[in-house]
Amino acid sequence: QVLQKDVTWTFTTPPPKIETKIPNRQTTKRDALMFISFDQEINAEAVLKTIKVSGGGKVLPIRLATQEEIEKDASVSYYAKQAQPKRWLAFRAVTNENLTENALPAASAITVTVEKGTPSAEGPLTTTQAQSFSFQTYGAMKFVKSYCEYEGSKNCSPFSMWYMQFSNPIDAGAFTKEMVKVEPAVEGLNIYPSGNYIYFTGYKKGRTTYKATVDGSLKDTFGQTLNAPATATFKVGSAEQSLYSQGGTMILLDPTAKPSYSIYSTNHSAVKVRIYLVQPANWQQFQNYVRRINYDDDTKKPTIPGRLVSDKIVSIKNTPDELVETRIELSEFLDGGFGHLIVDIEPTVRRDKYDHTRIFTWAQATQIGLDAFVDNQELVGFATELKTGKPISGVELSIYPNGKTVGSRQLAEGSQEQSWWEWLTSWGTSEDSIKETETIDGDGEISKTETVGEAQTNQTTANGILRLLLPDKQANEQNLLIAKRGKDIAFLPENTDYYWQESGSWFKRPLLDGFRWFTFDDRKMYRPKEEVAVKGYIRKITAGKFGDVEPLGDVGGAVTFSVKDSRNNEVVKGTTNLNAFGAFDFKFTLPDNMNLGQSSVEISGARSSTVHYFQVQEFRRPEFEVKAKVETEAPHFVGSSANVSVEAKYYAGGGLANADANWTVTASPTNYTPPNRDDYTFGTWIPWWRSYTNDYEDGGGYRPGGQSISQTFKGVTDASGKHLLKIDFESVKPPRPYNISAQVSVQDVNRQTFASSTSLLVHPADLYVGIKSPRTFVQKGENIEIESIVSDIDGKLIANRDVEIKAVLKDWTFDKGAWKEETIDEQTCNIKSADKGVTCKFTAKAGGTYTITASVMDDRERFNESEITIWVAGGKVVPKRNVEQEEAQIIPNKKEYAAKETAEILVLAPFTP
């Protein structure tokens, strides 16, 4: 058949649109290059004729920038490389004499306009409207203004940051703190330049007027100076009143110190303190009060539970505008140092009627630490000494208010109406059952197992554990695990902070069997009118302690399915049967007019259902496949080379010849540990207590540093559809292994593009040096012990190799606009490797962070090195320029401990002097 008449249609290609423009909203030099990239190919000469650059009240002459000018401009050359060929142009303003120096007017707003009618090199349509951007040329370096906190603030807080703004960006490299003088002097004041600003951070005294003077020698990034000093006045008023504590609505008093409760205040001379004596049974009433504590007119607000034992005004030794700690002594309200108190503290003077400042917390004075592990049938309680962490035997445990009690091995339900004391003294024993507990070592491996039976008494065993059956019914208040040993009574609520909980969750509940589905289709992506094949399996998941994956049994039968498009319209439905193995499969054909996008199949059967997703799209069928591989046999070393190849083949048979092959080769620092040598560090060590993503989420110790480097290459496939790329591994600094990833895309004449990738590992040398230390931190004056080995890449120890180990201590100093690390101590140890670890000792001469680097050289004079970090108490971290949350690091002295060992902890806090 042939067409009966001509078929005609039209389409439109878009005119050029700006994608990137520079400089944009910046302050620049008066001879700056301008750069514009478009979303399609252009003729630079033709587009230049439609560009108008105006400033200083006139239109400026322009010309295209030369290749030499583009290469000298770091910013323009970068964007030119990023843009696609023939889609950009760079140009500049010139004077009437065709000179470039100072061609842009000073201190002026420059507007660049790409006029209406700009042509494209890809189609006949021109732009229908103008496109523009602007930037500013620099003027004389001037002081603009100063302020604190925010513009317009009249009084500065002692904690506020100060700002001095200038007309041009400051040359941070030429800046020194000596250029700025502050009167009166501020101890610990930090001064930083950034952009057009000088920042002043640190604590200033309240009720004080400061004068900051910046020397006239301050330079901008254009080489100009202020010429005359700039002076700013900052009036620091009083700090805002504050009153707070730490720990939330429940705290444990320090078991190693005299019972007291600390509050922190600023500009308060006294507080009103009320103390209530309470018991664990009062917890729910306490939570109900906290829930409505700030509702002034709430008639439902309950009374504060317990007995008021103290109501007095406590004076604060206030220092104006400074944070003051005040300790509220609690010993007199406790029985032998044990008991439960509600501490209610309010300021005697409030800022205004909206000030609801109040500290309201429950304080436990106990020597018992409690943990609870709850499933659907029982609670496992664990009692330990708060001082030492050791398990405690003989601690009476039970669940309040409706926990099970035991008498003569018979279970009975505790009454929720019992008094607290009757309930506390009525605990008993329960039926015996066996349960195995596991002790996990530092690597997550099981090191010891113990058998723990269900409770036969209400007291913990020698391992501090007691198994308790859960109540049969839900309590109408939050459940508590209460522990009693003599006068010492402690309790653990279900939660301490969510005070809206009105019922308990520790009660028996059945676990129901469930079903799991596994479904898949043949292609994941389809076109309308194509057939989709879906297969799947259903398995029964039995609940309980012995639950497992099981066959469906008698639950099988028919499976129904409903196919829905991306707009949730049902397009196909049907039914199939499960076979004896719980498997099913079905096929359906997609309609011609089906909506494109993510579609789904809702499948139901065996008293459960699932949803399987697939894509419906319009696309061309792939005509060829691409495979990349490494041709050169491993191992690979620096100083050698490797060949990688790509092969493109038609599915119909034969190679894809004369096709463009575009390679991107990326070198990324990585790590390599020789076999059976993971007890030493190879490469750059990262502490296990820090969290990193990807391969380092397990918290474990090695992570490569540095940045990846990428290069691109182009080629053409040969007659067989192959292309070979040779990669030379010339050098690496610092010496470390690298992962080389080679990604290649091949495009045929129909512009179908497919990609593949391969990778290989490059060793810096055929020897590796491993190091370790028995401690992660030491005290000043102590020895730092480093043990090292030398191994080949197969893990075989190599003796009689020269190893140099350096211990370098650096400190942070501010120099030329940036914080820099400066070496203050360097020690070197030269040793010969052996068939076992060899030790070097260094002396920790000062506080800070010692970087320990060990290096070794192989027979071909190639180096390899490894690096670890050792902390010495007393160092400091990089100060933060911005207002941001900083972190305190907690560093253990080693990774693993044996029983009865003492763990030492080093705390690196940014808020210490």
Image (cartoon, rainbow, N blue to C red):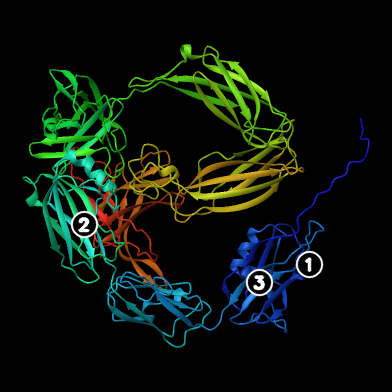
| Camera-side residue of 147 and 170 | 147
State how many labels appear.
Answer: 3
Please tell me in which quadrant of the rendered image residue 797 appears. Answer: top left
Say the numbered circle drawn on residue 46. 1
In terms of secondary structure, where does tag 1 sit? helix
* x, y percent for residue 827: 29, 60
Please tell me in which quadrant of the rendered image residue 820 appears. Answer: bottom left
Say the numbered circle drawn on residue 484. none
Q: Is residue 619 above or below residue 319?
A: above
Circles 3, 2 touching at the beta carbon (< 8 Å)? no
Residue matched to label 2: 779
In terms of secondary structure, where does tag 3 sit? helix
| Camera-side residue of 730 and 889 | 889
| Camera-side residue of 708 and 404 | 404
Residue matched to label 3: 69
Mark 3 to mark 2: distance in Å?
57 Å
Quarter that holds the N terminus: top right
Report the amino acid beneath label 3: Glu
Crowd class of label 3 (few under 14; some 14 to 19; many from 20; radius 10 Å): some
Report the side of 336 relative to 376 (left or right): left
Quarter that holds the C terminus: bottom left
* x, y percent for residue 544: 34, 21
Mark 3 to mark 1: distance in Å?
20 Å
Report the amino acid beneath label 2: Gln
* x, y percent for residue 118: 77, 65
Please report whichever mark, 1 or 2, sits nearer to the chain's N-terminal start: 1
